[in-house]
Image (cartoon, helix red, strand yellow):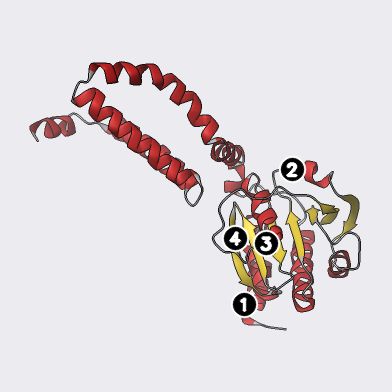
Amino acid sequence: MSDLLWYLQRLDWIDALDILLVAFIFFWLLYLVRGTRAVPLLRGVILLIIIITLLGGVIHLRAFAWLTQRALPALLVAVPVVFQPELRRALGRLGRAGTLFGRTTGNRALLEQTLAAIAEACGTLSRLRHGALIVLERETGLQEFADSGVFLDAMVTPDLLVTIFDPHTPLHDGAVIVRHGRVLAAACVLPLSTAFLADRELGLRHRAAIGVTEDSDALAVVVSEERGSISITHNGRIIRNLDAKRLEAVLYAFYQPALERAWPRWSARMRRIWGGEK
């Protein structure tokens, strides 16, 4: 107890800042792996470190300490391999740090028109029970996925999206990628999420929507073919059971930094969406 008080008395603001920085890094790492397959692996690594510390440092087992010292370099090499998906996602988010400050370019009127068209189209597709997957590109480029589909470069309209996802058309089986208010490509192939999904009602479209948002800052809107429900995914997370009105509100919430300078017009739009005004 006296040693603890002695250390606390010697703390200054630099030491406090140092401790807060280390705590923030650990919190950030734990937040990144939350809800992923890396959680039980991380628990195993922490338990292994505790056992090594107790047996090698406290009890002073010489042979065991020698073994752990030789195995430590191999463990340091294995950790990045085991946690490769999570580390890749973390570095990607770090590179997109500018989006935290609302760095969004483009015409606001075009953005409003695009979001409204997507919400209207998803409402129609939901009523028709036509499956759909629409990905909105943001800061992270999705050209590699667009190259796997059919190039269109057409203005986003509800009629176009409903036509693309009609089951009788050749482009319905795949994703539509939207860039700067235009349909860049259709019938695109997306990576499936490797995370464990407890809900068995989530099909391949939902897995693809989650997968494309795990490694990018894109938004993905999914319309279920079986139930007609609307979902939106971002950052590997999914918001389910939306209708067209709520979908438009959620899309505007994600793009709020780009619209906040035009606050009166944006707030009026929000009141109309939430209040049901015509």
> How far across and down, in percent of the image, does residue 14 sit?
31, 30
Crowding near the residue tagged with mark 1, few <14, some 14–19, many ≥20 C-alpha atoms within 10 Å: few
Tell me the mark number nearer the camera, choosing from 1 and 2. Answer: 2
**Which sits earlier in the primary sequence, circle 2 or circle 4?**
2
| Displayed quadrant of residue 225 | bottom right
Q: CA distance from mark 1 to mark 2?
A: 32 Å
Q: Is residue 191 above or below residue 2?
A: below
**Which sits earlier in the primary sequence, circle 1 or circle 3?**
3
Q: Which residue is mark 2?
A: 141
Q: Going 32% across and 35% down the picture, which residue do you hit?
A: 19
Q: Which residue is mark 4?
A: 238
Q: Is residue 72 above or below residue 197?
A: above
Q: CA distance from mark 3 to mark 4?
A: 13 Å
Residue 245 or 12: which is nearer the viewer? 245
Tell me the mark number nearer the camera, choosing from 1 and 3. Answer: 3
Q: What amino acid is at disc 2? A: Gly
Tell me the mark number nearer the camera, choosing from 2 and 4. Answer: 4
> How far across and down, in percent of the image, does residue 227 sit?
69, 74
In the drawing, does residue 122 fall left or right of residue 78?
right
**Which sits earlier in the primary sequence, circle 1 or circle 2?**
2
| Displayed quadrant of residue 148 | top right
Quadrant housing the N terminus: top left
- Residue 17 is at least partly visible in this image: no
Q: Which residue is mark 1?
A: 274
**Which sits earlier in the primary sequence, circle 3 or circle 4?**
3
